[in-house]
Structures are given as C-alpha cells and as structure tokens.
Amino acid sequence: MLKKIDYYILRETIVPLVMTLGIAALLLLLEKMLSLFDFVINEGGPIDIVWQMLGNLMPQYLTLVIPLAMFLGVLLAIRKLALNSELDALLASGVSLNRLIIPCIGIAAFLLIVNVIVVGFIQPYSRYAYNGLYFDVRSGALGASIKAGEFTDLGDGLTLRIEESRDSGRELLDIFAQKENEDGRVLAITAKKGGFFITPDERYLILKLFDGTIIELDSSQAKPRVLNFDEHDLPLNVPMFEQFRARGEDAREMTFLELWQERSSGNDSYVAALHARTARALSILIVPFLAFPLGLVAKRSGRALGITVGIVILLVYHKVLEFGQAFSAEGAISPWLSIWLPTFLFILLTARLYYIGAYKVGGLPLRRLEIIYEVVVEAITSLISRLRTVD
C-alpha cells in the first residue's frame, strides 16, 4: 500500500517538476537570447554563434532552476492531495507527513547529485566557453566580427568584403580583398573561400585564401598582372590581437576539485566560490521540507499563497548567497558568516514551517498571512466599489 502511495506522489511530483524545469529554463534563455542577438549583430558576428552561447549558459541557469522546479513539483503535488481530500484520507489512515515526504527526499537526493555535477564540473567549462565566444565576437578573433556584405577596413591598407560567414566566422565565403602597398601597388584579390589563422608566435593573423585570382595594379606597368591560385596566404600584422585568457583566472571557471586544491592558496575568491557552491548544492535537500508545509491549503479558500511565498524565499536566498559570495571573495567578511549563516537561517525557517504543518493540529503555516491577505483584498474591493458608486 505504501509503495503505491510513494509511486503516486512521485508521479504527481515529477510531472510538474519537469514542466517547470523546461519552462523556466526556456524563459531565462529567451530573455538572454534577445540581448545576445543584438550583441552579435552589432559586432558583425555570425548568427549561429548565438545558439552556442545559449547552450553554454544553460548549466548556469540550472543552478537556480533546479531548486525552483523541485519546490514547485513537491508543492503542487501536496496541494493537489490537500484540495482533493486525499491528504485527509492518508492522515486519517495513519500515514504522516514524515512518511509522505520520503519519496520527495529521494528526488531531492537525485537532484543533489545532478546539481553537484552541473555546478561543480560542467558549469565551469561552459562558462569559460561562453566567455571565450563572447571574446571572439567582440575582438574579431578568427574573423568573427567580419560583417557579411560590408567592406571592412582591417588596417595596413587592407579592405575586406565577404558574402557569407560560417562556423563562428572561421570559414569565409566569396571573398574580395584589396591591398594597397606603400609603393603604390594595389592588389585586388577574389577567392571562393578562406579563413583566419594565427601564427605560432601570436603576432600575425594569416588570411588563407583558396581558389581565387590576384590582380596587381602598378602605375609603372602598362597593364595589370593577373594570377590564378589554388591557395594564397595574406599575412596581417595585428599587434593588438590577443588570445583569450586561460581557464581558471576566474574562480567561477574552476571545478570543485580545483577549488578544493586551491583553498589554502590565500585567494579569497576561490574559498568563497567553494563555500557558495557547496551551500547551493546541499540546499536542494531542504527544498522538499519547505514545499510540503507551503503546499498545505484550506479547501475553502484554495489560495495559492504558498507558491508566491516559497518562490520569494528561494529567490531571496539565492540572491543573499550571491551577495555573500561577492563580499567574501573580496576578503571583507568570512564565508562562514556571509554564506553559511544565511543557509542556517534558511534551514531554521524551513524547519519552523515544516513543524507547524506536520505537528500542529490543523497546521497551516500561512493561515495568518492568508487572513491578512483576505482582509486587505476585501478592504481594497470595498474601496473600489465605493469609488465607483460615487462616480
């Protein structure tokens, strides 16, 4: 019998959890997608690089979305049981909330593992990849900022125009280039395709052209010289060009193991990142105990106040950890105070709400808040009705 109940709760929890996970991640990506499209278009990068950047942002968003999805999944499941009187039947048969929460704790344990993998090992690499793509588009590395259909001045008398850019700007199609030398000679070059490559000493970019024609115009010659080529290298002196930095200069780009190894290095940002990630990962185990009492609702009102309150609590906790990590990274405050104290307060608040729901007679943790809400709504409604009557 209990196994059937566990299966039923799992089913009622997993469905809204997965839906919330997908919808929340999609909304966050859509919001970011608009700014990325604007950035890439203004910088002249290829549109397909936006999808790569969004893919690398997904692990970062999951750190917020996973606890939120877990909370809504559990809350909506227990809320449905309460509204359908199924919870009353289970409690009357001797099944307590402590027993009903067990399958939800199992889901939380699974998501804890997922969260550790995402936050501790996937997110550092994806964040570094995202920053690398951002750098390439902004700096023009490997041709990412060559605007298709426009003439681009690359310096040293070289003007370039391409019809199409592929593979994040690494492959250029239908190229026209004009090179003006100091002696007055002008080279007009056309090629079917090409790409940028950096020399081993990182001092030059090579514009490698394939299957094209060179026309040399020289005032001292009676007619231009024409040369067809299969492959031609056009070196560009780019002293300001820089390669993207190595991974690990930013603590957010280091894995759990790397942060653990550097914890005694004296770098406060590494210590703060290690504490913050550990607190975020472990807090997923607290979420079911927050969602269960907030999902308890009186059948007469059926208000969804618990959803709003729970989301606010999770968002505030998330932001407090962000600020705590920032202050701790600067060495202004100990991570035990800026990160673990808010976590401890979050646990105390959750324990208090769960205690009311599980051990108080008719325990509804938000009952007083609901009464205040009803009084305020009734007063506002009455005021609006009076104003309409006066009009």
Image (spheres, rainbow, N blue to C red):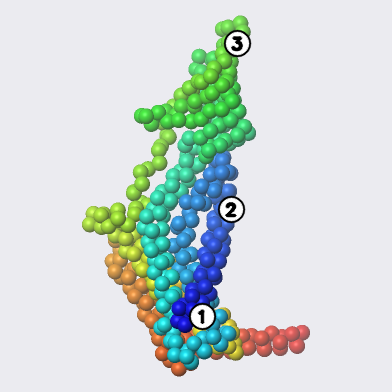
Q: Residue at x 41, y 78 (%)?
A: 102
To which residue does mark 2 refer? Answer: 34
Indicate which disc, 2 or 3, sits on the residue closer to the N terminus: 2
Nearer the observer: mark 2 or 1; the answer is 1
Residue count near mark 1 (Cα–Cα under 10 Å), binned few <14, some 14–19, many ≥20: many
Please name the residue that numbered disc 3 is placed on: 224
Residue 191 left/right relative to 350: right
Residues at marks 2 and 3 touching, judged by CB atoms closer than 8 Å: no
Q: In this orientation, which residue lies closer to the viewer: 184 or 158?
A: 158
The kind of secondary structure element at disc 1 is helix
Question: The C terminus appears in which quarter of the rendering?
Answer: bottom right
Residue beneath the point at 49% across and 25% down: 208
Amino acid type at circle 1 is: Ile
Q: Is residue 292 visible?
A: no
Instruction: Say which quarter of the image contains residue 159.
Output: top right
As rendered, which of 16 and 163 lies closer to the eye? 16
Label 1 vs label 3, nearer the camera? 1
